[in-house]
Amino acid sequence: MPEPAELALVIDDLTVAYDQKPAIWDIDLEVPQGALMAIVGPNGAGKSTLIKAALNLIPRAAGSVLFHGKPYEAARHLVGYVPQRGSVDWDFPTSVLDVVTMGLYGKLGWLRRPGRRERAQALAALEQVGLLDYAGRQISQLSGGQQQRTFLARALVQDAQIYFMDEPFAAVDATTEAAIVNILRELNKRGRTVLVVHHDLQTVPEYFDWLTLLNVEVVASGPTCQVFTLDNLQKTYGGRVTSLHGGQVLAAGG
Amino acid sequence: MAERRVWAMIAALLALGVLLVPLSQALFGLRLTYTVRVVALGGSLLGALSGAVGCFAVLRRESLLGDALSHAALPGVAVGFLLAGRQLGALLVGAGIASWLGLRLVAAILRTTRIKQDAALGIVLASFFAAGIALLTYIQSLPEASQAGLDSFIFGQAAAIIASDIALLGAVGLAVTLVLALLWKEFKLITFDAEFASAGGLRGGLIDALLSTLIVVTIVLGLQLAGVILMVGMLIAPAIAARQWTHSLEQMVVLAAALGAFAGGSGAVISALDSDIPTGPMIIVVAFALVALSITLAPGRGVLWRQLRQRENRRHFRSRRLETGA
Amino acid sequence: MMGLERALIELLLRFVTHDALNAFLRSPQHTASLVGCLIAICGALLGTFLLLRGLSLTSDAISHTVLLGIVLAFMLMTGAGLEGDTSSPWLIVGAAAAGVGTVVLTETLHRSGLVRQDAALGLAFPLLFAIAVILVSRFVDDVHLDDDAVLVGEIGLAWANTNSHCFEHCESLRITPEHPAAQQMRQCVNCRELTISPRDERAEFREVCGNCGVYTPAQAWSAGLLDEAPTLVFFPKSITVMLVLTALTVGFVAVFYKELKLTTFDAALAKSLGFRPAALTYALMILVSLVAVGAFDAVGSILVIAFFIIPPAAAYLLTDRLSGMLLLSPVIGGAGAFFGYDLARGWLFGMLPVAEGIAALNAIFGLQLREAWDSSISASVVLTMFVLFVLVWILSPRYGLVVSAVRRANSRRRFDDQVVLAHIHNHQGTPSHAIELRAATLHQHFRWTPQKMNRVLMRLRALGFVSQEAGSAILTQRGDAHVHAFRKQLLVAHNIPDIDPTQP
């Protein structure tokens, strides 16, 4: 068992309930620093709920979450967040550069306004996701994939230690998928911890080195090579895995 | 490019606003009395204020919340009168409290029942308004009271505006501008992506409450001029018109303020042409005319513009098909 | 309309005498309550579908626009020399068209893609209302269309606006100069012209008949020209109008119940099955407009929206079935209309006197408010509906605040139990057993207070789910079975077969 100091995220007995029905139930999770982790599970398994509860966006019924040993209030600056793309109004009158700059608002604090330095940081993040040419664009003119990369750039400027990403791969084009993967690897190389809610089982072993299988409870969590087994997937998805993704998953797991 | 165009437009509107009174005197031979000038000034101040604040209401998809809140203010006016008599301060404070209670009630219904937003707004709007009407009818039955003028909060009565009201509007307008400027990035973030704002450590609830307070204050100040029924038009029409011309929130808010000021001022002047034309409704008609103009003409987004582009595309497509065919 | 009214009265006269009927209808309270109940029934039935479709505020927009329709039609009618009457059928048709026009206008604004639905509504109705107000104050000078009528209507006066129907001794009377009752008078024909008094010698006279003309039976009787009283019934126009609208509404809902249900629940499915959701929506909107016009005289153009929104919202908190809502919401609306009249006269639900409330306020705050309460009837009806809504909101056996609070407290207790049981179950027999399950520090894992932890543990021990072994909490066999049963329940809820990851 790793020493607590090496753990980027420790979730202890976390339970969240909607209408008194548990959405996630007594979750224990330890994520070592530098892990690139996928959170995988069927619809309604509580994946987004887990992220939102960790970030204090929804109330917890019980349990605690520590980021590098600190509770959320003391660790805000360590945390970066990429919400689901559909959660905002993309017809909002603002430019791509502006949205990315929003990632720095938390650091700026009350009353201070973004200046030259913040602009440079935002432009650098846009270059990283390949959207530099789009900096002045109105956000409604972006494609779905470009919107996703804008959100990613906004998280990048936060320069966080732990990133939480809610379905960044949902309905994006191949270019964007490649760009996101590159950035995930880059973050991984720099020793950042990344948690990604993910849907596509095929790509799990290729993209992620750490995996948590979730179905209201944690079914299994650990290095992908150990956790990504047919047995575990069947426990998570209830035996439907073979019929849906049989060949590939078997090949990957075996 | 687009940026400069919008700033030019704002400047033109402001110039037009300043010149409005002398111009209409020169061109139409209008004799604008002191009263009319005061009303026009009040109209523009209120238009500017509600235009700027209204942008946030529209972008947060709370256009109709403004309607419910303005109706909800009415019983507060009546209670203020019953407690303190006809003092504008008491009436406005009462209106503000009632409006705020309405806001809380909508939130409570949404939180504890499965009733959706539209019905919750309707419930609060209708019942608060009914309470206001019931109280006003009761007040009318009081023998000693000089209740004249309370009705004006329903339809608005611009003629009742006096110089001290202008000072109040100006002071509040200044305060609101200051709050907007200081908390600009917080308001912007909470309006665009409330979840990210909270995750990033912003006090979401506090900012939200502040923004709602700004909207309530604006509505309460506008009641005297526009009345509870039409206030929602003052709040959202300039914002919707401004949205068509620009893609930046900064410009949208400033332009909405300019458009609102223009509608308020010119509506007041037009209504001075004929003693039977009420000011509040006239301002709303002018504001809507601005919306109609913006929706059809705004470059890039407007209906006319898009149709032109569609035709262009079709012609382009046809000629290319001919080329490949040949 | 008159024929229908007459047929209805003939039916009624089989059961009651015309004197009793007149006496009943002449009471402002009876007529007001009846009209109010009919509006409430129409509003509640239509409002139920609006609520379920998320269109409640469309009734707000329509009721405002209908005012514009009424004003325009009114101006046209007076312009054509007709008597302006807000219950004329032509006016109703015109105003209904205006109401539908609003829906079309907001739809067009919305479809342009430039303005959102709520903003489109918020734009359309202040504009149309503003135009109506301008027209009223600029061109219309009539008692039926002043500000007050627009706001609150005159339901208290509904009894006075009647059609008279005669059933016996109905000869209309023509008084000619030869008639014995004719009153002959001398009138000066050139006095005004010459500005002289009739006494002046230049004055010329002619004989005129002072009371000649045609008399309806009612007029003849009241002028004392008849020996025998005609049997007359004075029937309030609003009752007829609202009865017709109620029949239309009930008929519409009854005939198209299945289609309305389907299109409300799933418009796309309905379309694929060959129904026309758009046509039904417009039919619904036409009826909403008609009811708004019909109710305009009684409750004005703003308060009417309460009849569409509040009763269905209350019913929505009482039942889960569409049929239940359609039965309950008219009852709630009707009760509001019935008790609302009492409230206007100072009695809440006929029991609690408002005056005492005011007296109490005066006593507590040292105010000097008049204690006699006499207020607008239509506003009081709306307030009564709101009070009913709040009562339902608090007390509803299904979704009420009280029941929810009790249920929440209960399930929170059960839920706490499950959290602890799951925790013990997950750690029992694992290497971290000793740390995670030590009874003395167990509360730290949940971020609970030791007191709460003790309460929960005590309960679990009493239930025989948990016992203590070497300072650690462990599950009993019964507790283990319970956890498995609960997990089964949980996973079934997510539609996934029962697989226990902790089982080998």
Image (cartoon, rainbow, N blue to C red):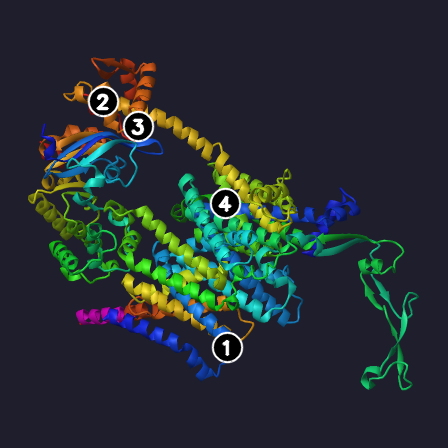
Q: Which residue is mark 2?
A: C441
- Residue C6: x and y, percent? 72, 52
Picture layout, residue B209 above or below residue C190? above
Picture layout, residue B11 above or below residue C146? below
Picture layout, residue B5 above or below residue B235? below
Q: Which mark, by number, is residue C48?
A: 4
Query: Is the same chain shared between marks 4 and 1?
Result: no
Magenta span includes B315:
yes
Q: Chain of mark 3?
A: C
Query: Is the same chain shared between marks 1 and 2?
Result: no
Q: Which residue is mark 1?
A: B33
Q: Quadrant of residue C478?
A: top left
Say which amino acid is labelled 2.
Thr
B82 vs C401, left or right, is: right
Kindly report which numbered mark, 4 or 2, lies closer to the viewer in this rendering: 2
Q: Residues within 10 Å of mark 2 (few under 14, many from 20)?
A: some
Q: Which residue is mark 3?
A: C490
Q: Chain of mark 4?
A: C
- Residue numbers of the magenta segment: B311-325
Quote the CA–CA distance across marks 4 and 2. 54 Å
Mark nearer the N terminus (4 vs 2): 4
Quote the CA–CA distance across marks 3 and 4. 34 Å
